[in-house]
Image: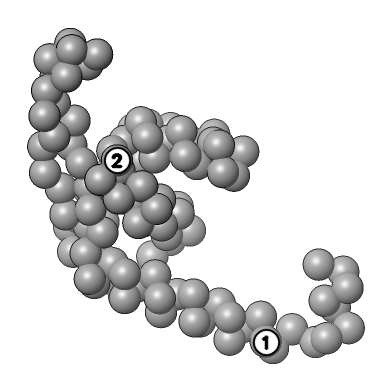
């Protein structure tokens, strides 16, 4: 498993964990992706991605409290780690550096 690289969906899910903070769990992430980006995502894909990010050390998880609305079930809450924040920061810097290389003439097309 390559810890030095994130795929596009991994980056998206990790970013959503950072945005949602203490409300970062599977369904909330799916809903946030839909609301903010107009993009449908699969709950199973989000869960697999969260567990992969946890294996890489970019998020950690804990069980939230049981609620009546969930039939007494607890939800797994994900939190971004310092390593996860560093990865997002590095990816942002790399993308910014690449965008600076796009010729000025092409900015009008974007």
Rate crowding at label 1 as few (under 14), some (14 to 19) or many (20 or more) other CA atoms within 10 Å: few
**Residue wearing tag 2:** 23
Residue 24 pos. (x, y %): 30, 43
Q: Is residue 82 left or right of residue 41?
A: left
Q: In this view, does 4 lie above or below 27?
A: below
Residue displayed at 31% across by 76% down: 86
Task: Name which quarter of the figure residue 102 lies in.
Answer: bottom right
Residue 91 pos. (x, y %): 45, 75
Q: Which colour scheme is used?
A: one colour
Q: Is residue 93 above or below residue 41?
A: below
Residue displayed at 24% across by 72% down: 83
Task: Name which quarter of the figure residue 30 lies in.
Answer: top left
Residue 50: assigned label: none
Q: Earlier in the sequence, mark 1 or mark 2?
A: 2
Residue displayed at 37% across by 35% down: 28
Where does the C terminus fall, quadrant-wise?
bottom right
**Residue wearing tag 1:** 100
Residue displayed at 48% across by 58% down: 8
Residue 6 pos. (x, y %): 38, 65
Q: Confirm whether residue 6 shows in the render.
A: yes
Q: Confirm whether residue 2 shows in the render.
A: no
């Amino acid at each position: 498993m390559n810890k030095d690289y994130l795929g596009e969906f991994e980056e998206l899910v990790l970013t959503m964990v950072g945005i949602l903070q203490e409300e970062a769990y599977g369904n909330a992430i799916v809903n946030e992706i839909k609301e903010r980006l107009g993009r449908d995502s699969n709950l199973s894909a989000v869960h697999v991605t969260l567990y992969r990010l946890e294996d890489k050390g970019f998020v950690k998880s804990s069980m939230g409290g049981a609620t009546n609305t969930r039939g007494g079930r607890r939800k797994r809450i994900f939190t971004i780690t310092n390593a996860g924040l560093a990865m997002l920061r590095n990816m942002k810097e790399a993308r910014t550096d690449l965008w600076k290389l796009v010729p000025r003439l092409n900015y009008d097309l974007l």
